[in-house]
Image (spheres, grey):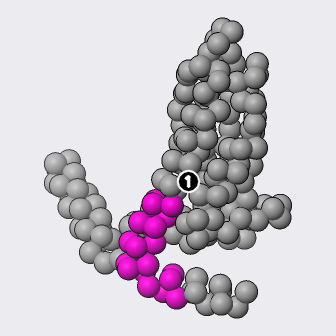
Amino acid sequence: MKDRIKALVIFWLVSVSGAAHSSNDLLFDGGVEALIATKDSFIIKVSDQVTGGCLPNPNALKDKMEASLRRDGFSITSEESFFNNVILITAVGYPMNDISCAVSLDVVMAFSITVNVPFAYESYGDGQTMTNYLYPIHRGVLTGPKRKIQDSLEDSVTESAEKLFLEISRARDRIFNDYPAIKKKMIEVRSAN
């Protein structure tokens, strides 16, 4: 009897998951691409936690990111809002000796999303809350001569901007093809502004 029940459950799960994937279902097929496809405006922030002269010009990281994103057609804003798409560049490092440095570089895109709170639907309205989602773009550690580490970090930030552009472009290609109503609504909203 247990084997029959297991077989029925497995059959049901396979048929349900097959049905979910047989058509374009944003819930099952959209994934993170659905979250990033419409991103086109950013605020850029730099968190400089580097000591010992290993990052003499942290604002250059912001400038490199901004120049690259603007070149790719994105807009940059300085207006602070909970709903902004924030590119956060975090550098943490120190000198290893008098002539060399080690710096950890982390680049993420943070943006607000609405998520369902488990078991809250019946008691608290629609059972949803807002939270920040951190989309990873780059994470790495750079080591090298103190005189060259700034340039290496700037190159990594430029590569991060190029990677983000490609990931958003590819997400748009797939999401707008599979879910044309999203593209249509995005165009409507942008035209109204």
Question: Magenta residues, as a range?
Answer: 165-184
Q: From the viewer's perspective, is residue 32 above or below residue 61?
A: below
Kind of residue at badge 1: Ala
Most distant residue in the top direction: 97
Quadrant of the image occupied by residue 129: bottom right
Give the residue drawn at x 72%, y 70%. Answer: 125
Q: Main secondary structure of the magenta part?
A: helix
Q: Is residue 115 magenta?
A: no
Residue 162 position, x and y percent, is 50, 55
Give the residue drawn at x 68%, y 15%. Answer: 95
Residue 68 position, x and y percent, is 59, 58
Quadrant of the image occupied by residue 116: bottom right
In the foreground, 154 or 167: 154
Q: Is residue 181 magenta?
A: yes
The residue indicated by pointer 1 is 161
| Label 1 SS | helix
Task: Left or right? Give the position of 3 relative to 93.
Answer: left
Q: From the viewer's perspective, is residue 91 above or below residue 127?
A: above
Residue 31 position, x and y percent, is 45, 62
Task: Left or right? Give the position of 174 relative to 70.
Answer: left
Quadrant of the image occupied by residue 111: bottom right
Task: Left or right? Give the position of 29 relative to 145.
Answer: left
The number of discs equals: 1
Residue 117: tell me if it is visible: no
